[in-house]
Amino acid sequence: MNNRKKVPMRKCVATGEMKPKKELVRIVRSKEGEVSVDLTGKKSGRGAYLSKDREAILLARKKNVLSSHLSASIEESVYDELLALVEKEKKSH
């Protein structure tokens, strides 16, 4: 038996690093063009992954990579939510 399951890897759109999916957060744009943070990773729509890392989120905000990846305008509140999420994760470790 091979218990070493293949870890699904995803690329952080801000840093370009490949990381295990668990270390990233998915941002999704629905067909209606609504952008939200997808904590389940299962929402349908165009997704982009960001490292759960303050620097990566700030970089994404500065370079506006999410809006080009998702072809949608990104509300400031999406970044606020991502930053809050990262802070919360840090505290729980």
Image (tube, rainbow, N blue to C red):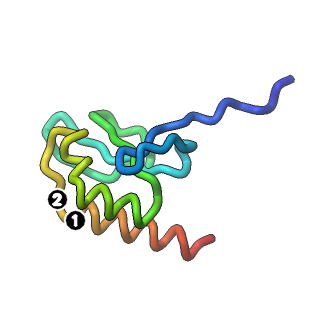
Q: Which mark is residue 75?
A: 2
| Residue at x 29%, y 43% (from the top left corner) | 28
| Residue at x 36%, y 68% (from the top left corner) | 83
The image position of residue 60, as x and y in percent, is: 30, 55
| Residue at x 54%, y 36% (from the top left corner) | 9
- Most foreground residue, 43 or 59: 59
Residue 86 is left or right of residue 14, and the answer is right
Q: Are marks 2 and 1 in contact (CB under 8 Å)?
A: yes
Can you say which quadrant of the picture contains the C terminus?
bottom right
Residue 78 is left or right of residue 22, and the answer is left
| Residue at x 41%, y 49% (from the top left corner) | 15
Residue sticking out furthest to the right: 1
The image position of residue 53, as x and y in percent, is: 46, 62
Residue 25 is left or right of residue 23, and the answer is left
Classify 10 Å Cα crowding around label 1: few (below 14), some (14-19), many (20 and above). few
The image position of residue 13, as x and y in percent, is: 36, 44
Can you say which quadrant of the picture contains the N terminus?
top right
Amino acid type assigned to the residue bearing label 1 in the image: Ser
Residue 54 is left or right of residue 47, and the answer is right
What residue sits right under mark 1 in the picture? 77
Q: Is residue 73 above or below residue 71?
A: below
Amino acid type assigned to the residue bearing label 2 in the image: Glu
Q: Answer with the quarter of the image where residue 86 lies.
A: bottom left
- Most foreground residue, 13 or 32: 13
Q: Which mark is residue 23?
A: none
Residue sticking out furthest to the top: 1
Q: Secondary structure at mark 1?
A: helix
Classify 10 Å Cα crowding around label 2: few (below 14), some (14-19), many (20 and above). few
Number of numbered callouts drawn: 2
- Cα–Cα span, label 2 and label 1: 5 Å
Q: Secondary structure at mark 2?
A: loop
